[in-house]
């Protein structure tokens, strides 16, 4: 059976797997192909809980965006966004706070092109191709889109992206550069893979699961907390993803550490 490709932007090779489309598949999205699903299943065979971790991360992101909208945030800068599948930041933000502005940022050109096609005609949204390590470019391009006003509070979302930045590239400096551009009352969201509470075989599988040439850097709670320097963590602080303000319909498993990732949201005073 031939898969429909009429939604694919010109110049995108659908015969090669894309990390962004693999992620989309794990999230239950429709923007993926057989080649992406095959790679996803290979990764899942090595890391059985990876799909649940990705889905848990996305559910956390949705909860957090609703929280941020309730706190008065109307500008969202989602860095390392991937493909904006159903229920992504712009849909949640616009539902909770009509008139919100959302800028998606990703370094993967496949994700960027798909995003631009999906968001065509969706007001208040924009897409930038940039690396999380290049904060100056992200800020400049956001201003150029005339969607983000850095003199007003902004929520910077770093969901599942900093663990792709090795220590040698100093992810803390990128976060600090973003912090300096933010007005008081802005927020920083981070979710990050960890080895805390994980058996050795799971840690090794997480490293092997990378198919993009970028090894995941598993960091401790202390290392991740340091990225929030200059911000005040909101309750419940930095916790395993399922523990961050769970909804009544999302009961927390007795072993939340099994997701292998922490999450936190903090406010700049």
Image: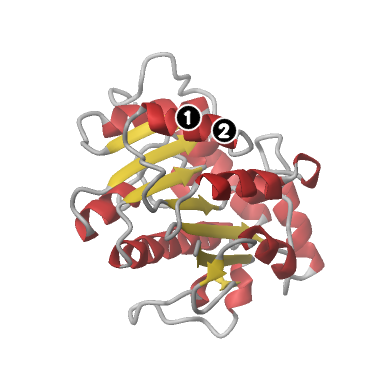
Asked if residue 179 can be seen in this view, the reply is: yes
For mark 1, what is the residue? 140
x 81%, y 66%: residue: 200
| Secondary element at image label 2 | helix
Q: Which of the 4 quarters of the picture holds residue 201? A: bottom right
Residue farthest top in this picture? 11
| Closer to the camera in the image, 169 or 252 | 169
Q: Is residue 1 visible?
A: no
Query: Is residue 265 shown above or below 255?
Result: above
- Judged left or right of residue 58, residue 174 is right
Q: Residue 256: x and y, percent?
A: 57, 77
Residue 73 picture location, percent across and down: 33, 57
Q: Nearer the viewer, residue 192 or 234?
A: 234
Q: Residues within 10 Å of mark 2 (few under 14, many from 20)?
A: some
**Quarter-of-image position of residue 132:** top right
User: Which label number is shown at residue 136?
Assistant: 2
Above or below, comparing residue 171 to residue 122 in the picture? below
Question: Which x, y percent locates residue 267?
Answer: 48, 64
Neighbour class for label 1 at 10 Å: few (<14), some, many (≥20)?
few
Residue at 50% across, 61% down:
268
Q: Are marks 1 and 2 in contact (CB under 8 Å)?
A: yes
Q: Which of the image's four quarters has the N terminus?
A: top left
Nearest the eye: 106 or 31? 106
Q: At which x and y percent is residue 231?
A: 56, 64
The residue drawn where x is 23% and y is 60% is 96
Residue at coordinates 33% horizontally, 24% vertically from top-left? 5
């Amino acid at each position: 059976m031939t898969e429909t490709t009429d939604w694919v932007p010109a110049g995108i090779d659908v015969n090669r797997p894309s990390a962004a489309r693999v992620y989309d598949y794990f999230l239950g999205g429709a923007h993926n192909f057989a080649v992406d699903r095959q790679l996803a299943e290979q990764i899942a065979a090595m890391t059985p809980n990876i799909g649940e971790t990705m889905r848990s991360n996305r559910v956390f992101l949705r909860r957090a965006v609703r929280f941020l909208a309730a706190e008065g945030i109307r500008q969202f800068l989602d860095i390392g966004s991937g493909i904006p599948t159903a229920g992504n930041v712009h849909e949640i933000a616009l539902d909770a706070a009509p008139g919100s502005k959302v800028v998606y940022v990703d370094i993967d050109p496949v994700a960027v092109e798909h995003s631009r096609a999906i968001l065509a005609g969706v007001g208040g949204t924009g897409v930038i191709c940039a690396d999380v390590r290049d904060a100056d470019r992200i800020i400049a391009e956001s201003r150029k889109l005339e969607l983000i006003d850095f003199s007003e509070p902004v929520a910077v979302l770093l969901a599942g992206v900093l663990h792709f930045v090795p220590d040698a590239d100093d992810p803390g400096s990128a976060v600090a550069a973003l912090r300096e551009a933010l007005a008081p009352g802005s927020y920083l969201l981070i979710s990050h893979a960890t080895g805390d509470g994980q058996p050795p075989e799971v840690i090794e599988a997480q490293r092997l699961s990378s198919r993009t040439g970028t090894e995941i850097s598993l960091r401790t709670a202390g290392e991740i907390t340091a990225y929030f320097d200059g911000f005040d963590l909101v309750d419940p602080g930095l916790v395993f993803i399922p523990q961050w303000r769970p909804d009544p319909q999302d009961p927390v498993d007795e072993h939340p550490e099994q997701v292998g990732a922490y999450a936190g949201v903090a406010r700049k005073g």
